[in-house]
Amino acid sequence: MTRSPRAVIAAAILLCGCASLPSQPRGRPAYWGFTGPWDQRSAASVLAHNVALDRVITGWISLDTTSFRPILAYPDTIGTSPALAGRAMALVTTYLGSRFHPEIVRGLGDNPEVSAITAGAIASLVDSGGYHGVVIDFEGMTVRDLDQLLTVTKAVADSVRAHGVSTIVIAVPAADTAAYPAALLLQSADFIMPVLYDQHWSDSPPGPIASPEWVTRNLGARVAEVGAARIIAGFPLYGYRWRRTAATEVISYDDARRLTTMTNTTLMRDHPSSTLHASSPEGWEIWVSDRILLETLVREARQLGVTIFALWRLGLEDPSIWSFVGL
């Protein structure tokens, strides 16, 4: 008898829900860093601080919206650096242009033959780039797409493993356990990575990007699903500036400091969210991550037993984070 995806999800969550939540941190924390290959600040940050990072995601492989074939969205200028030997990884994503394209996964998942061809082409790009791991990021799916998502992630995982990749991670939205059930996704991957940022995002009203309460609640739910040992917590290093008469823009910590200094605006901490915040009579509002917020998020996550943290994205960070990252 064939079981429905919902029944399978329920059974998997029931089996994994008994995982206990550790009351004390365990093990040395490991830090991974995502680069923005289009931004030279990322490369500069990697070259200056790579010794503090256990893995660095330098490659960006997108899936074409017409052919569904993988393309190198940006040249990777640092992935083959001897300084990163054995630590470079690639992002495999449906993000192209300005958004994710879930229709690509739906199309591939409905055609196993095409899915296998695409997975093989992804593996070839990963192999040629010398990457030792991949992060699969197929956001925008719904619970109705679960079978297609599982089919495509398994095809990609099987293909890259056959080419010698040692670590496979699947990024998942922080709160969507229905469309992205961790237990089922981990049948193909080594880790899941809850994306614990964009609590408020470019198209939302202004607000904190990752408040500790929001992060702890969503990360705790993921730990309850599958335990802490197979979870990588994704945390933000960036900020947003919401503008009244223009599009919201991503800003770095240094950008926020520079802008508030130039406009004589106070950048102060919002204590409930532990996040730096500023607003201007000119109509803009800033929320930005810094060392204190990151330390708070890491501390809360370690209380849940999580010991691996992925930082999005290098080059935008508060420089003082390097006083504790990697120690």
Image: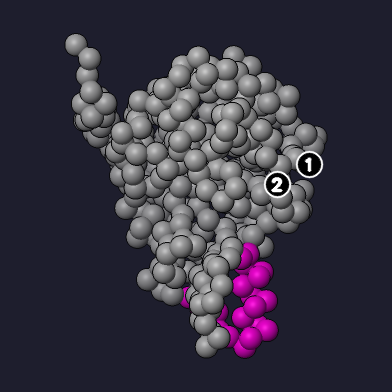
Q: Are marks 1 and 2 in contact (CB under 8 Å)?
A: yes
Q: Quadrant of the N terminus?
A: top left
Which quadrant of the figure has residue 260? bottom right
Instruction: Identify the residue shown where x is 62% and y is 30%.
Output: 70
Residue 67 placement (x, y as % from top left) = 59, 28
Q: Which residues are magenta?
A: 251-269
- Disc 2: which residue: 37
Q: Label 2 sits on what residue type?
A: Pro
Q: Nearer the viewer, residue 324 or 277?
A: 277
Give SS at disc 2: loop
Residue 142 placement (x, y as % from top left) = 34, 39
Residue 86 placement (x, y as % from top left) = 70, 30
The reply to whether the magenta stretch includes residue 83 is: no
| Residue 77: image tag | 1
In the depicted structure, whether residue 113 falls above or below residue 213: above
Most distant residue in the top direction: 1
Residue 172 placement (x, y as % from top left) = 43, 40
